[in-house]
Amino acid sequence: MANLASTFRDQGRWKEAEVLEIVVLEVCKRMLGTEHPHTLTSMANLASTFRNQGRWREAEELEIEVLEVRKRVLGEEHPDTLKSLHSLALRYQSQQRWDEAEDLLTKAMELSRKVIGPDHPDTRSRISHLSDYLEGRTQPYARLRKRKHIHSKQLSMARKRQKNT
């Protein structure tokens, strides 16, 4: 059922996806509990469908709940928690909630570097999102300094890793 909901979501059939995702979420909560990874994934999927329908508040509520449960159950540095943090940051960015977006984008990028390493595709994606965000939000000189700082830190870490091998 979750796969069919995902197919509907991919096809832009939001209402059909929503109906199935609500059923999947209810079953997951009842059978697995509210903190089970499948339940949290179901919540995140429903949040995505709400977001695609422009239902920002409902999407945000679910995304925050998923993030908080993952922090509590898995820890702040778990890769799934980082995905939730990054997802919420992008949501704030799309809603032009600039300060909240920048804080979460920065935190997601820094934790990713620490936890999964600077060369991991997820970390690179988060660095890119933060760079793009800063490029669009700050003055030309400030954004250039921030971008250089981000990339020089990444280069420095790569050099240290290379020396250790």
Image (cartoon, rainbow, N blue to C red):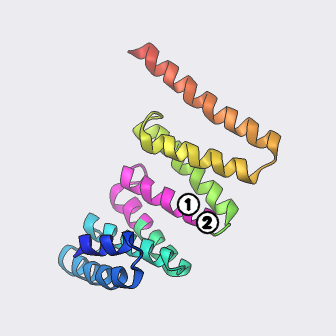
Q: Which residue is mark 2?
A: 94
Residue 78 image point, x, y percent: 37, 50
In depth, the one of 140 and 117 nearer the eye is: 140
In this rendering, the answer to whether 116 lies above or below 14 is: above
- Can you tell which quarter of the image residue 54 is in? bottom right
Q: Is residue 126 visible?
A: yes
Give, as a three-letter code, the residue at label 2. Answer: Ser
Residue marked by disc 1: 90
* Residue at x-position 38% and y-position 72%: 11
Asked if the residue at tag 2 contacts the one at tag 1, i.e. Cβ–Cβ closer than 8 Å, the answer is yes
C-alpha gap between disc 1 and disc 2: 6 Å
In this rendering, position of residue 45 left or right of residue 1? right
The span shown in magenta is 67-93
Q: Position of residue 79 (x, y in %)?
A: 38, 50
Whether residue 63 is in magenta: the answer is: no
Secondary structure beneath disc 2?
Answer: helix
Q: Residue at the spot x=74%, y=54% of the render? A: 137
Q: Quadrant of residue 67?
A: bottom left
Q: Residues within 10 Å of mark 2 (few under 14, many from 20)?
A: few
Q: Amino acid at mark 1?
A: Leu
Quarter of the image with the N terminus in it: bottom left
